[in-house]
Image (cartoon, grey):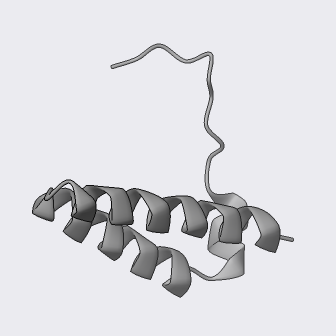
């Protein structure tokens, strides 16, 4: 089962980042973040549950 609290937390972070990007006049970043928010809203709970977790120990690309 997915964790709705984590999903909403992610959505809130994306919203905050979009607002900050808009405030800074970063129109492309704002658009991308708004689109990410729509994808979060559209994602099925099963999809969210199966998304890979961030691995903080992985090597950067």
In this rendered view, identify the residue nearer to me: 1 or 33.
33
In this rendered view, identify the residue nearer to me: 32 or 23.
23
In this rendered view, identify the residue nearer to me: 33 or 16.
16
Measured as percent of width and height from the top left, residue 4 is found at 79, 73
Quadrant in which residue 1 is drawn? bottom right
Measured as percent of width and height from the top left, residue 60 is found at 40, 17
Q: Which quarter of the image is occupied by the C terminus?
A: top left
Picture layout, residue 29 above or below residue 15: above
Measured as percent of width and height from the top left, residue 17 is found at 41, 56
**Residue 3 shows in the view:** no
Report whether 60 appears left or right of 40. left
**Residue 16 shows in the view:** yes
**Residue located at (71% from left, 75% from top):** 46
Measured as percent of width and height from the top left, residue 56 is found at 62, 23
Quadrant in which residue 36 is drawn? bottom left
Picture layout, residue 37 above or below residue 59: below
* Furthest residue toward right: 1
How many tags in the picture? 0
* Furthest residue toward front: 23
Report whether 44 appears left or right of 39. right
Quadrant in which residue 25 is drawn? bottom left
Picture layout, residue 9 above or below residue 45: above
Report whether 14 appears left or right of 20. right
**Residue located at (66% from left, 43% from top):** 53
**Residue located at (41% from left, 81% from top):** 38
């Amino acid at each position: 089962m997915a964790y709705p609290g984590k999903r909403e937390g992610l959505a809130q972070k994306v919203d905050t980042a979009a607002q900050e990007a808009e405030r800074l006049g970063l129109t492309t970043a704002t658009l991308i973040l708004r689109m990410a928010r729509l994808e979060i809203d559209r994602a099925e709970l099963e999809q969210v549950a199966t998304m890979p977790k961030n691995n903080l120990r992985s090597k950067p690309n």
